Structures are given as C-alpha cells and as structure tokens.
Image (cartoon, helix red, strand yellow):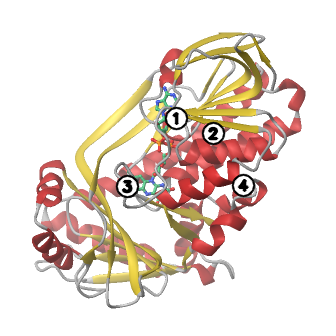
C-alpha cells in the first residue's frame, strides 16, 4: 500500500468491520491481497461494555475451512462450544410442555460436530487481535465509507476522515443498510414479519450436553445454543423470537419476571434460567439485494442478504459468499474485481442465497403460527419427516449447506 498525497492504493477496500468484514479482511489479507477495512464503530471487545454485540454465532462445519485458511481458527478454537445435536421440540399443545422432541445427531453424518458456537463480542476481540498480525491488512476503526465512484479500471472510495482510497475491488460488508450497496445503485427486496428477536445469555443448573435446542410454540422459535461454562455454571446463548409487541414487553420485564417467563417458554428443560447479560432486541426481516455485484463492487453478508436467525444460517451464508469470492480472486489475481469475476460471483451466490431464504422464510412462518390446528399440523410434519432416515440426513446436510 503506498500513500501518495492522501490517496491510498490497495487491492481491496472492505466497507464494514462486523464479524463478516473482519473475517473477510483476515481471509484476503492472509491470501496476500493488500486490504483496507473501515468501520465507523470501533469494535466492542468486552461483554460488559455498552454496545457489546449480545448475539452468538454458530459456525457450521463448512465454514471452518475459511477460518482455518485465514489463521483465525487456531485463535478461536479454545473458546468454542461444540454443537453435537440439534434438538427440535414442538411445544404447541395446550400447556407449555414438550409434546414432540426430535434429535438430529451430527454422528449420523461424520465424526465432527455440526458446528461451534461463540459469543460475537469474543469473535470481534480475537479477530481484531489477529488482523494486527497480518501485514497486508490495514484495519481503520472509527472511519466510515462516505463516497464511491467506480470505473472499469477501478474504484475510488472517500472515507469520513477525508482519505481517498483507490481499490481494485470494494467489498460491501457494511450491514443491512449498506452505504456501498446504495452508492452502487443496487436495490433490495425486504419482507418484514412484525416480529422481533431477543438475544442474551443465561446460566442453568442442568448441563446442555452440547445440544442446541429449538422450541416451537407460537410467535417464532425459542433457541438455546451451548456456550462454554461461565464461572463454573453451564451456559447458553438464547434467541427468543416473538411478535414485536410481545418481544418489547418481554424485554422490559423486571429480571425476576423475565426469568419466570423464560422458564415457562423453555419448558423447563435446563432448569431455572438465570439471565447473565443484557437483552438486545433485533427486528426480524428477510432481505435480498437485487444483485450481489456491480462495477468493481461485491456485496457480502447482510449487505447482500438478511434472514431470521433460524438454523444458524446467517453468518454461515456470509462465509460461503466470501469463500467463493476468495476462490475466484485466487484463481485469477491479475483480474481481481473485473466484470468477469464479479458476474461469476453474482451468478453463483444469488440463486443459492435465494433458495435458502425461501426455506428459512417457510420455517419462520411455520414457527409463528398461533392457531392450534396449524400447530398440530406443524408437529405432524416434523414427526413424519424425521421418521424417514434418508430425509433426516438430507435435511441435516441441507442445514449445513453441504451438497
Ligand atoms: C439475534 C440474532 C442471532 C443470530 N445468530 C446467528 C448464528 O447463530 N449463526 C449465524 O451464522 N448467524 C447468526 N445471525 C446472523 C449474523 O449475526 C449476521 O449475519 C452477522 O452478524 C451479520 O454480519 P455483518 O458483518 O454483515 O453485519 P453487521 O454485524 O451489521 O456489521 C456491519 C458493520 O458495518 C458497519 N458500517 C455501517 N455503515 C458503514 C459505512 N458507511 N462504512 C463502513 N462501515 C459501516 C457497521 O458499523 C457494522 O460494524 C444472527 C442474527 C441475529 C439478529
């Protein structure tokens, strides 16, 4: 990277340093591409600090390759909580009780777990530390992308501190309201569900046994995902989806009442749940950009697609974006960011993401249903699908994104 009268030259400018942008910076930097990554919000790397990301991310098995290649896996592995079993419970009967429980066991597919779960604030801490060790990466927290002009020969990006950057490829990882996507003139289609998710962590007396559990009743799934023990107690991350008004009511409840509501909604399966973090509230939507590329621009992660957090798909789809983009870049580094490469990216990823969005949208709508006959139908379909072993294996592979 050379600085000439405040114009920086780089192979890649990544707009956005969320988990997706930081992973992309590590992956492309480790592959030898000079990479600048900017984000207006300095990463919050402590759980207790205000603005800390209360979500957790389950990296599914196929995502591990890109984390290994970028040197991140070695750092993350000691903090991982493995996910061996995905349990689905239907609690849609009269009482808040599990009336149908089905286990999907990773052992049916291989010796490895389905994936590994991490708190997002910890991912940021480890990723930022790792970037500091990659000479090709220049991470600039506190700086936003504010301007974009593209030509066939390259892109010129203006940053909020007045710096101009010339890049061969601009990667939009700046989230669901992406500045770069808009500046590139790419439209989006958004579906809202009138639904919100609460994200927080708990401890509980009964160990989770590396089982991730999705409980369906109405309003959306209640999902417990294993975390490593916390101060000697078993711990889980929870995503609790409900109609928006109900989610807001729950988020405002005094802790004791909230814990009682959690106990009921969890059917008591891990014993009394103790809230150990704040409750973050996320509006639920499905969103897809009309195209995943434009001249000298590639959209990845939530800049390209947003889905409700069901089956740990969101960030894993993002890592699939960047795995494919990296493959194209490494196959032909001399033509990085040119139309042929970016068209290939769009043509491959857009239909794959669209198909996955349709599946998650259906699952979410099925989980939201209120009427008893529909809830009974949902339990019946789950039971029937599960009882056929080939179907069960196909569902597990599809969930992992393995062909
Ligand atoms: C409750 C919940 C639970 C989830 N659980 C899972 C899970 O278990 N597994 C999974 O795979 N996925 C999960 N997801 C999805 C996953 O968290 C997201 O896909 C992922 O965090 C999105 O990452 P991102 O980097 O695209 O977006 P963000 O995290 O939103 O990052 C975008 C970044 O861009 C920056 N930015 C904004 N404007 C600019 C600008 N002008 N210039 C530069 N930077 C800018 C922002 O400051 C931000 O840091 C979950 C989502 C939710 C809501």
Work out how far the residue at label 3 is from the one at label 4, CA to CA, in angstroms.
29 Å
Q: Classify residue 249 as left or right of residue 68.
A: left
Q: Earlier in the sequence, mark 3 or mark 2?
A: 3
The residue to which callout 3 is attached is 49
Name the disc covering residue 66, or none: 4
Q: Secondary structure at mark 4?
A: helix
Give neighbour class at mark 2: few <14, some 14-19, many 20+ (Cα, 10 Å).
many
Q: Earlier in the sequence, mark 1 or mark 2?
A: 1
Work out how far the residue at label 4 is from the one at label 1, CA to CA, in angstroms.
19 Å
Q: Are marks 1 and 2 in contact (CB under 8 Å)?
A: yes
Give neighbour class at mark 3: few <14, some 14-19, many 20+ (Cα, 10 Å).
few
Q: Is mark 4 within 8 Å of ligand 1?
A: no
The residue to which callout 1 is attached is 304
Q: Nearer the viewer, mark 3 or mark 4?
A: 3
Which quadrant of the rendered structure holds the N terminus?
Answer: top right
Q: How many marks?
A: 4
Please give the name of the residue rendered at 81% of the width and 22% of the height, measured from the top-left corner: 2
Work out how far the residue at label 3 is from the one at label 2, CA to CA, in angstroms.
36 Å
- Residue 371 falls in image quadrant: bottom left
Residue 351 spot, x, y in % from top left: 58, 39
Name the disc covering residue 349, or none: 2
Q: Earlier in the sequence, mark 2 or mark 4?
A: 4
Above or below, comparing residue 217 to residue 82 in the picture: above
Residue 219 spot, x, y in % from top left: 20, 58
Work out how far the residue at label 1 is from the one at label 2, CA to CA, in angstroms.
10 Å
Q: Nearer the viewer, mark 2 or mark 4?
A: 4
Q: Is mark 3 within 8 Å of ligand 1?
A: no
Please give the name of the residue rendered at 63% of the width and 66% of the height, measured from the top-left corner: 76
């Amino acid at each position: 990277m050379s600085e000439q009268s405040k114009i920086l030259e780089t192979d890649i400018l990544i707009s956005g340093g969320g988990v997706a942008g930081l992973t992309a910076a590590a992956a492309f930097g480790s592959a030898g591409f000079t990479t600048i990554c900017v984000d207006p919000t300095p990463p919050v790397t402590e759980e207790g600090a205000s603005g800390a990301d209360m979500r957790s991310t389950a990296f599914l098995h196929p995502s591990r390759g890109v984390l290994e290649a970028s040197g991140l896996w070695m750092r993350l592995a000691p903090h991982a909580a493995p996910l061996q079993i995905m349990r689905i419970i239907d609690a849609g009967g009269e009482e808040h009780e599990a009336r149908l429980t089905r286990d999907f066991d990773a052992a049916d597919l291989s010796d490895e777990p389905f994936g590994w779960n991490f708190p997002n604030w910890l991912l940021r801490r480890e990723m930022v530390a790792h970037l500091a060790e990659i000479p090709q990466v220049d991470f600039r927290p506190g700086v936003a992308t504010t301007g974009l002009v593209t030509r066939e020969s390259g892109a010129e990006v203006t940053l909020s501190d007045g710096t101009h950057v010339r890049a061969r490829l601009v990667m939009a990882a700046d989230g669901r309201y992406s500045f770069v996507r808009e500046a590139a003139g790419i439209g989006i289609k958004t579906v809202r569900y009138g639904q919100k998710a609460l994200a927080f962590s708990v401890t509980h007396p009964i160990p989770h046994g590396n089982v991730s559990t999705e409980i369906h009743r109405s309003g959306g799934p209640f999902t417990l995902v294993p975390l490593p023990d916390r101060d000697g107690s078993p711990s889980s991350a929870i995503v609790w989806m409900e109609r928006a008004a109900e989610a807001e009511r729950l988020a405002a409840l005094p802790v004791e009442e909230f814990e009682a509501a959690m106990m009921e909604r969890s059917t008591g399966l891990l014993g009394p749940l103790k809230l150990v973090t704040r409750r973050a509230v996320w509006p639920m939507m499905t969103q897809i950009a009309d195209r995943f590329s434009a001249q000298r621009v590639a959209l990845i992660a939530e800049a390209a697609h947003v889905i409700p957090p069901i089956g740990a798909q969101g960030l894993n789809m993002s890592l699939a974006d960047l795995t494919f983009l990296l493959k194209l870049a490494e196959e032909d580094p001399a033509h990085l960011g040119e139309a042929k490469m970016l068209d290939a990216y769009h043509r491959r990823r857009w239909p794959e993401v669209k198909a996955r969005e349709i599946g998650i949208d259906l699952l979410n709508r099925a989980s939201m249903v209120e009427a008893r006959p529909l809830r009974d139908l949902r339990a019946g379909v789950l039971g029937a699908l599960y009882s056929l072993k080939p179907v069960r294996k196909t569902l597990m592979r599809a969930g992992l994104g393995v062909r």
